[in-house]
Image (tube, grey):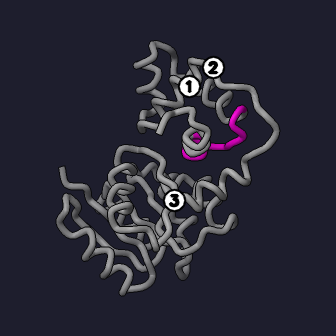
Amino acid sequence: MTITVLIADDHPIVRDGLRGIFTGRGFEVVGEAANGAEAVALAERLRPDVVLMDLRMPGTDGVAAITELGRLGNPARILVLTTYDTDSDVLPAIEAGATGYLLKDAPREDLFRAVEAATRGEAVLSPAVASRLMGRMRGPAREPLSQRELEVLTLVARGTTNKEAAKKLFISEATVKTHLIHVYAKLGVKDRAAAVAVAFERGLLGS
């Protein structure tokens, strides 16, 4: 199955390079955007599987675009690809709903794997970004996750929706949401991507 990709970056040479890297190999670049507003418009029209989103762009930046796509209910997975790994860049992007966060110096094979993983709904974080998130989220020892909470989180890591998780576990969707609230509290995070990242870092979900 061909994975469709939309590239959002304000530098034409970067877009050209990414298009060249992704042409063939099971990927199809369906569009290019020079800013966040263009990215939102094209994502709505083209419905790509994955959006490669730069953060710092003129006008509407990457975080604003990610937020807007989430508000619109756009199904595209957002993979941030940027040169910046500061807290002020990483955390807002993850909280806005980015599926993953990679730096532009990542090897191309890592980029391919990240896009494939993002398509499956898996959280993808570069080592530097994962370490930074962990540094912010580490705190006093927290209560361990229950077996049911681990089951819910495992399904979330596979890209399963709350409704799908409820069906698989034979519980209500409201119960799934309650378990996730407990997971977030125990892991000290605010959303699904961060919960998955921390759980992998702690070895709760295997490698």
Q: In this figure, which residue is indicated by the disc labeled 1?
A: 150
**Residue 193 is covered by the magenta coloring:** yes
Q: Report x, y in % for residue 79.
A: 44, 59
Q: Secondary structure at mark 3?
A: loop
Does residue 19 sit above or below 137 in this rendering?
Answer: below
How far apart marks 1 and 2 lie (CA) works out to: 6 Å
Q: Residue at x 32, y 74 (%)?
A: 18
Does residue 206 sit above or below 115 in this rendering?
Answer: above
Q: Report x, y in % for residue 73.
A: 45, 49
Single out the mark in the foreground, 3 or 1. Answer: 3
Q: Report x, y in % for residue 45.
A: 31, 62
The amino acid type, in three-letter code, at marker 3 is Ser
Q: In this figure, which residue is indicated by the disc labeled 2?
A: 146
Q: In this figure, which residue is indicated by the disc labeled 3?
A: 126
Q: Which residues are magenta?
A: 186-195
The amino acid type, in three-letter code, at marker 1 is Leu
Task: Assign the magenta stretch its main secondary structure.
Answer: helix
Q: Position of 168 compared to 29: left or right?
A: right
Q: Report x, y in % for residue 181.
A: 66, 31
Neighbours of disc 2 within 10 Å: few (<14), some (14-19), many (20+) = few
